[in-house]
Image (cartoon, rainbow, N blue to C red):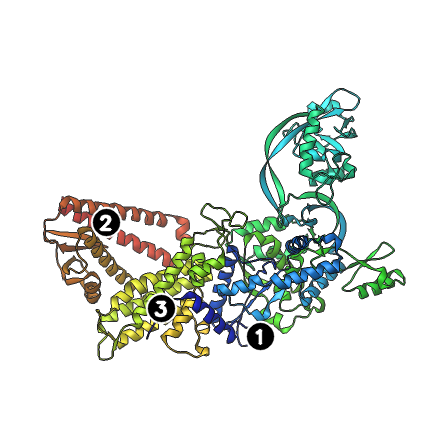
């Protein structure tokens, strides 16, 4: 076979992806005779381009889907994108601004026309980029959250939940994004600790010359103050009960009220109450029936109710108010202060608490099945450490503000009538019929005005695992064949930061509309961070371009590089050396096959000398495969890759191929060659989910194959029983080889210089079985069995002492130092093993095989210590 000297990832990637697509290997159709395995992609924002988080997330999904496909399951990976109301509208507004067009000058219809044009031009970029990574999605199933059928599903759900009394409209304190000019749910607010100032402001007591000093971080809101609150138990302010204070600068009197909510230890022990601009003050205002004065416009500037600095931005106003207070002699002092401030998850603007008329979903009852299903492991989170966080959120959940003051999205199906009422219906025509029947009116369509707001993006994506298969079930209540077959899906791979945004809500919707969980497992990835521990982001400029990485290192190199150190739920400290290691792994496999394919085969030769090597690797492969399967079953994808990596790099390339490699220009026997190709094919199968392109290329290099024999659909190997003794014995032989090689290096003995090895052992038959392997790998002329040699250097493997004769005089002190060093190391190793075995929790919880392995380590270490001590005694 002729094989290129160097692997060309770019050529292989374009060739094999096209081949897989042409042959329909990614597509999935309902097949009652096959077990379905389903993953729905966390739909990336339609505004998005591939970043490192996407790379990690989608690599894991592809690994899972490819393995399931090879296991003979009907693998279905549904791709798609999310319309991302806030982010997309911001992009379109920015685009229009560059064109000299203000959104305010456009009608809703004209704006949406521009938005759809933008979506058609840029919306599919990220999905095309995922193909470069090797993502084997069923692209014929690609969905978009504003597709007509998915949009109908969203509207049906809103109407249904409103009819059930679970959706209501009301004035509530909401999180307001002044940059996006929209309400946000609690989950869309990211708390950040920032350095701010604490301003101590003096409020004059009405009818006296006394002042009351109040500490606040927001002096720009004093014009919205409606009361000052003191703790009734605070003796410092007893004399102020029933009195009034004067707001500085605007000179408006406000009552002094009492409530034990006030923390007597914070600031000056009294609180200014601003119900329109603080959630806690709002609750206090309701309790004491206080007035509400909102002094901020939707864009965060001061309005007329502020009386001063009207039109100024809130943060500029803060500085100016502080200056005016100082000039008026009413600013006592300013202190540095750290505080947690809410920021918009989408725009990063500082969020304002704001009273607003919005649509809400009642969460108290609808969340109960979703909470119990995770707590009882009906749905399993991987790693399970996230269960407590999930429970905390679900047990303290607030009603979900589902309306957004935007145009891009699903417009709320509520229609306002001339009589001040409203009707919720799927269409304007339905709303008209309901309105005229309910109110005995004769309105026309022109009399109805649809709500201007759109629904929160998550209100569409919470239906994703259901609606991508059956968008009609929300109105019919009858699942179609696809939903019955593919739902519930199997595994969801996503980021912990959207555990509440999306995962919890999908679970809620799943139980509400199917009575069933939406998925069985949730694999939560970590955050990809740079070497300094910072989250990778465009703004920091610390994130490499994923496509550039693929170009430089190959998709397989990047995929394995991302997975080398990414355990579930833990952050990935990314270093480009990881993908370099991935590329090196690709080259190692390529070169291994070049080596094997370059051997001449002689059918007349006997393969007897290689039987020990073949027998060992067969057992070692099944041991490794058992371990790999165990890792997969526990969603330890990184560990599964590392076990595969060691099997290929260490066991197959470094040991097995060296054991069976013929002498230079000598042929190999047919039996050994056939077995080696068989091993190589098994290795390619296990590697394929991680490294799809390289493995498919080599699979077809081995021999020409029909499409029906492609690796992507080849049968996943099942682990067979293995003989642990053979594996342990081989490990002992490899230890001897390594020790001989190390000794050659330390003594300056050429690898080409053969010498005898004498072994003091009680298991000479072991070394005899591996005689050919030992002689070949350690370049030994003879292997003898006996007692210690004079003028020889020695080393210990397990309980056996091995001697190599030296031509010159042996340096006794040097040998003593070497043995002492090894003795100390072995004692330390034994100590570690004993700590494990003395740990009652470990012994009680670990599998029997693990405990047995630790006890074997103990016995081996103890035997080695005894042999080393005896060797040391001889030199003393």
Q: Would residue 552 appear left or right of 315 to someone viewing this image?
A: left
Mark 1 vs mark 2, foreground winner is 1
Residue 551 horizontal/vertical position (percent): 45, 61
Front residue of 80/387: it is: 80
Examine the rendering and report whether any part of residue 310 can be seen. yes
Q: Farthest residue in the top direction?
A: 209
**Disc 3 target residue:** 721
Q: Secondary structure at mark 3?
A: loop
Q: Residue at x 72, y 41 (%)?
A: 301
Mark 3: few, some, or many residues within 10 Å (few <14, many ≥20)? few
Q: Earlier in the sequence, mark 3 or mark 2?
A: 3
Q: Earlier in the sequence, mark 1 or mark 2?
A: 1
Examine the rendering and report whether any part of residue 524 can be seen. no
Distance CA(mark 3)–CA(mark 2) = 32 Å
Q: Residue at x 39, y 72 (%)?
A: 699
For residue 542, above or below residue 282: below
Residue 281 horizontal/vertical position (percent): 71, 38
Q: Residue at x 42, y 65 (%)?
A: 9
> In the rendered view of the protein, which quadrant contains the C terminus?
top left
**Disc 2 target residue:** 865
Distance CA(mark 3)–CA(mark 1) = 35 Å
Report the disc number at residue 30.
Answer: 1
Mark 2: few, some, or many residues within 10 Å (few <14, many ≥20)? many
């Amino acid at each position: 076979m002729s094989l290129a000297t160097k692997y060309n990832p770019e050529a292989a990637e374009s060739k094999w992806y096209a081949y897989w697509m042409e042959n329909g290997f990614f597509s999935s159709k309902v097949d009652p005779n096959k077990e379905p395995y389903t993953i729905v992609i966390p739909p990336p924002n339609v505004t998005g381009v591939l970043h490192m988080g996407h790379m990690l997330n989608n690599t894991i999904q592809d690994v899972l889907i490819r393995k399931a496909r090879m296991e003979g399951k009907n693998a279905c990976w549904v791709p798609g994108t999310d319309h991302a109301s806030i982010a997309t509208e911001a992009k379109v507004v920015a685009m229009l601004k560059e064109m000299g067009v203000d959104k305010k000058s456009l009608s809703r219809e004209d704006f949406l026309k521009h938005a759809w044009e933008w979506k058609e031009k840029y919306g599919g970029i990220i999905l095309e980029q995922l193909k470069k990574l090797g993502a084997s999605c069923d692209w014929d199933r690609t969905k978009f959250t504003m597709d007509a059928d998915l949009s109908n599903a969203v509207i049906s759900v809103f109407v249904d939940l409103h009819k059930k009394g679970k959706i209501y409209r009301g004035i509530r304190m909401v999180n307001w994004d002044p940059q996006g000019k929209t309400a946000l749910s609690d989950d869309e607010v990211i708390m950040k600790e920032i350095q701010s100032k604490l301003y101590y402001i003096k409020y004059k007591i009405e009818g006296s010359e006394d002042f009351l000093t109040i500490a606040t971080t927001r002096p720009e809101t004093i014009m919205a103050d409606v009361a000052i609150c003191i703790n009734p138990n605070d003796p410092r302010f007893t004399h102020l009960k029933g009195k009034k204070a004067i707001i500085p600068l605007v000179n408006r009197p406000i009552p002094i009220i009492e409530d034990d909510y006030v923390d007597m230890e914070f600031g000056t022990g009294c609180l200014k109450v601003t119900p329109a601009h603080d959630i806690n003050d709002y609750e206090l205002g309701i309790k004491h029936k206080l007035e509400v004065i909102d002094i901020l416009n939707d864009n965060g500037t001061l309005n007329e109710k502020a009386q001063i600095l009207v039109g100024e931005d809130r943060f500029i106003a803060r500085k100016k108010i502080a200056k005016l207070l100082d000039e008026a002699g009413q600013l006592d002092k300013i202190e540095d202060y750290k505080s947690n401030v809410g920021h918009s998850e989408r725009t990063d603007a500082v969020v304002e608490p704001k009273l607003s008329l919005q649509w809400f979903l009642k969460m108290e009852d609808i969340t109960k099945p979703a909470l119990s299903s995770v707590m009882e492991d009906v749905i399993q989170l991987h790693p399970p450490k996230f269960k407590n966080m999930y429970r905390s959120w679900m047990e303290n959940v607030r009603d979900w503000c589902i309306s957004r003051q935007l145009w891009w999205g699903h417009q709320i199906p509520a229609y306002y009538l001339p009589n001040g009422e409203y009707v919720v219906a799927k269409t304007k025509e339905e709303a008209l019929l309901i309105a005229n029947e309910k109110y005995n009116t004769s309105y026309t369509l022109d009399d109805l005005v649809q709500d201007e707001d759109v629904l929160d993006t998550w209100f569409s994506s919470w239906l994703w695992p259901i609606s991508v298969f059956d968008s009609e079930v929300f109105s019919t209540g009858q699942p179609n064949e696809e939903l019955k077959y593919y739902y519930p899906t199997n595994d969801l791979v996503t980021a912990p930061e959207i555990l509440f945004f999306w995962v919890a809500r999908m679970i809620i919707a799943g139980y509400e509309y199917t009575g069933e969980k939406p998925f069985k497992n949730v694999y939560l990835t970590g955050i990809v961070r740079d070497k300094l521990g910072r989250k990778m982001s465009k703004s920091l400029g610390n994130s490499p371009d994923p496509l550039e990485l693929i170009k430089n290192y190959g998709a397989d190199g990047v995929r394995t590089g991302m997975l080398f150190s990414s355990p579930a739920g833990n952050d990935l400290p990314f270093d480009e050396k990881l993908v370099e290691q991935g590329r090196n792994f690709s080259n190692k496999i390529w070169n291994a096959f070049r080596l094997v394919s370059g051997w001449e085969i002689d059918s007349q030769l006997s393969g007897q000398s290689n039987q020990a090597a073949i027998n060992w690797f067969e057992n070692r492969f099944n041991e490794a495969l058992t371990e790999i399967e165990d890792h997969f079953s526990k969603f330890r994808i990184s560990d599964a890759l590392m076990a595969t990596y060691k099997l290929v790099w260490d066991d197959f390339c470094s040991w097995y191929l060296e054991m069976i490699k013929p002498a230079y220009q000598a042929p190999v026997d047919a039996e050994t060659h056939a077995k080696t190709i068989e091993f190589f094919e098994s290795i390619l199968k296990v590697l394929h989910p991680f490294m799809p392109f390289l493995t498919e290329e080599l699979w077809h290099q081995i021999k020409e194959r029909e499409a029906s024999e492609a690796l992507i659909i080849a049968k996943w190997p099942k682990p067979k029983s293995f003989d642990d003794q053979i594996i342990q014995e081989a490990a002992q032989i490899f230890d001897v080889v390594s020790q001989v090689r190390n000794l050659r290096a330390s003594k300056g003995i050429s690898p080409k210089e053969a010498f005898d090895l004498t072994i003091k052992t009680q298991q000479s038959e072991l070394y005899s079985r591996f005689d050919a392997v030992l002689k070949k790998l350690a370049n030994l002329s003879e292997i003898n069995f006996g007692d210690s040699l004079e003028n020889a250097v020695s080393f210990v493997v397990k309980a056996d002492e091995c001697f190599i004769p030296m031509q010159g005089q042996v340096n006794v002190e040097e040998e003593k130092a070497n043995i002492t060093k090894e003795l100390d190391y072995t004692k330390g190793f034994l100590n570690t093993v004993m700590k494990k075995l003395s740990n009652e929790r470990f012994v009680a919880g670990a599998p029997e095989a693990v405990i047995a392995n630790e006890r074997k380590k103990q016995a081996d270490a103890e035997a080695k210590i005894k042999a080393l001590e005896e060797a040391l005694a001889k030199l003393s």
